[in-house]
Amino acid sequence: MLNFTIFDLNVISVFWGFWVSCLLGELATRTVVNRLYRKAELERTDGQRLASLWDGILEKFIYTSCIIVNLPLGIAAWLAFKAVLQWRGPKPEESTRYRVEPKIIRIGTALSLIFGVVGGIIARGGDLSW
């Protein structure tokens, strides 16, 4: 059974975990993703950038929360949900956006996952007893 309960958490550790995950992680992810979009010469509207910002913060929050409450399966569920939402199917014409953008999204997702898990580990005070 579980040796770790939510009541064993230190409030300061939880704060720092979410800070690293949601704020520092989002800053790093945004920097990388925006540079990749510029390098690929793809334009995004302000609305797309804002939606991407909040999606990234939510995603890191979910990953961090799943680690804190000892529910790594929640991460897999979120990734599956995200994959279904982003599925576009085959497209007849080969545009740069269609070929490059999914790769940029996957890089952003990988960075979010890394920062979310690290934030969860920090929030748990380094305790990884599953």
Image: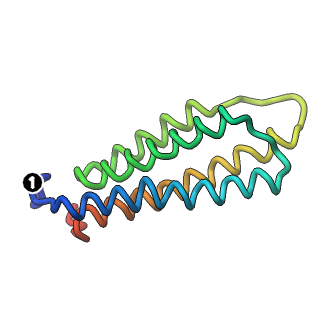
Q: Hey, what amino acid is under mark 1? A: Phe
The total of numbered circles placed on residues is 1
The front one of 104 and 61 is 61
* Relative to 44, residue 19 above or below: below
| 107 with respect to 37 (left or right) | left
Residue 89, position as x, y percentages in the image: 72, 29
The front one of 4 and 16 is 16
* Relative to 45, residue 107 above or below: below
Quadrant for the N terminus in the image: bottom left
Residue 98, located in which quarter of the rendered image? top right
The front one of 124 and 25 is 25
Residue 127, position as x, y percentages in the image: 22, 68
Residue 55, position as x, y percentages in the image: 52, 39
Residue 62, position as x, y percentages in the image: 37, 45
Residue on which the image places disc 1:
7
Mark 1 crowd level (few <14, some 14–19, many ≥20, 10 Å Cα): few
| 108 with respect to 79 (left or right) | right
Q: Which residue is drawn at 87% across and 28% down?
A: 92
Q: Secondary structure beneath disc 1?
A: helix
Q: Residue at x 16, y 62 (%)?
A: 10
* Relative to 52, residue 114 above or below: below
Q: Which residue is drawn at 64% across and 32% down?
A: 87
Residue 36, located in which quarter of the rendered image? bottom right
Quadrant for the C terminus in the image: bottom left
| 63 with respect to 36 (left or right) | left
Q: Which residue is drawn at 34% across and 46% down?
A: 73
